[in-house]
Amino acid sequence: MDKRMGVIMVMLLTIFLGFGIIIPVLPEMIVGSGEERFHLYVMLAVYSAASFLLSPVWGALSDRIGRKPVLMVGVLGFSVSFLMFGLSDGQLTLMYASRVLGGVFSGATTACAVAYVADITPEERRTRAMGLVGMSIGLGFIFGPGIGGLLSVFGNEAPFFAAAALALLNFFFAFGTLQESLPAERRRAAAAAPKQSRWTAFQGPIVYLFLMMFVLTFALAGLESTLQYYQIERYAATPQDIGILFLVSGIVGALVQGGFVRRYAKNGTEPLLIRVGLTLQALGFVLLLFSKDVWTASAFMSVFAIGNSLLRPCVTSLITQSTRAGQGVTNGLSSSMDSLGRIAGPLIAGGLFELDMSLPFFVGAGVSLAAMLLLGKYLSLGGRSSAGPADAAG
């Protein structure tokens, strides 16, 4: 493995480990400060909204000045945001400021890390590389909440301080080991070129891939926001049961991304893998309606996880191959679509759940299958087909 790829994987792992650490205590800190629970949902939306707005800006900046400076600023900003929340001491204004700051800098990390990988990876290996990126992020989300739960015995603020320390260590590690991926001549060309709108990449067949990225995140975020409530209604699931469910399915998903996708996915196979992934994801949604206990729920959630793990690296790879804009702008816009899905998913799925607790799962399955139409439209307009790479039709 390329040493630079290894550094990026460590960076993403520690970033999302830090993000996952705070999940078990964030609601407790809000309610414990005497505030209403709805502030939690608003904070989550504000975080994603800030990321949605700023990701393309960071991406375009990285096209002009290089990936490393933007990554360094992002990781340092992440550290400050976690520290601020840990020191908030129940002050709602500081909590909101922390989440806004975290959302602002999240685009400088994830989007630029993906652009960095696209810079150093040839097209024929890009899908495999994106599988490693997904595995690193997934592992952070898998083990982060468990570590956060253990640290909470030292106080609800402890996970935030640990996340801040992790991000700071990550900063020093990457600063000393990470090399710039964007050659100076490409940076000069980007700096001399007219300023690109964040929507520059949103044209041609690639539009349907960006919409698919939104749909994938919308479905996943909707599931994450309603699954625990549904399992409680089905078999009185405990928080420990939910932890086991996400741990099992997360490990399965990480193995698929780091094993199958990395080893067997090749340039040109993405459309086929996307179709398989969408089918399995839709099946997982429906199967979860028949959960009887933590083990059946874990098995059904693993079906969903396998499908979702095939989808994200393949769609991301096609986006990086198909764009005619800079990788920074492109991946910044992709990250923005991801954030938009995280804003809309929980709000819509939560509303559907209140009407009928099975509705979010049926809608999630339907949306997953409908996403095949987006893939078909992308291919029909000259996008890359399963036969191999092809230039977009003019």
Image (spheres, rainbow, N blue to C red):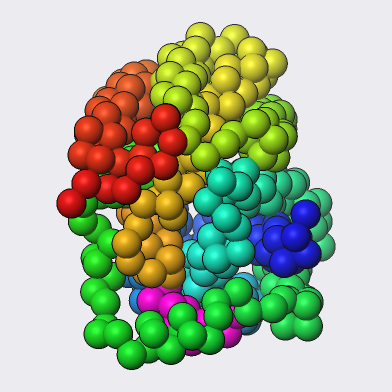
Q: Position of residue 309 (x, y in %)?
A: 56, 35
- Relative to 206, is 156 on the left or the right? right
Residue at image coords 42%, 30%: 386
Is 20 colored magenta in this rendering?
Answer: no
Residue 275: in sight, yes or no?
Answer: yes
Question: Where is the N terminus found, in terms of image quarters?
Answer: bottom right
Residue at image coords 24%, 65%: 199
Residue at image coords 39%, 85%: 189
Task: Identify which residue, 204 or 360, lies in the foreground.
Answer: 204
Q: Relative to 339, is 262 above or below?
A: above
Residue 225: in sight, yes or no?
Answer: no
Task: Identify which residue, 151 or 286, lies in the foreground.
Answer: 286
Locate residue 336: give its quadrant. bottom left
Q: Position of residue 185 (x, y in %)?
A: 49, 85
Locate residue 135: give its quadrant. top right
- Relative to 287, is 203 on the left or the right? left
Q: Relative to 115, is 246 above or below?
A: above
Q: Position of residue 348 (x, y in %)?
A: 29, 39
Q: Relative to 96, is 245 above or below?
A: above
Is 65 colored magenta in this rendering?
Answer: yes
Residue at image coords 36%, 52%: 322
Q: Relative to 68, is 301 above or below?
A: above
- Find the residue positioned furthest to the left: 394
Q: Position of residue 252 (x, y in %)?
A: 69, 29
Give the residues in magenta.
59-69
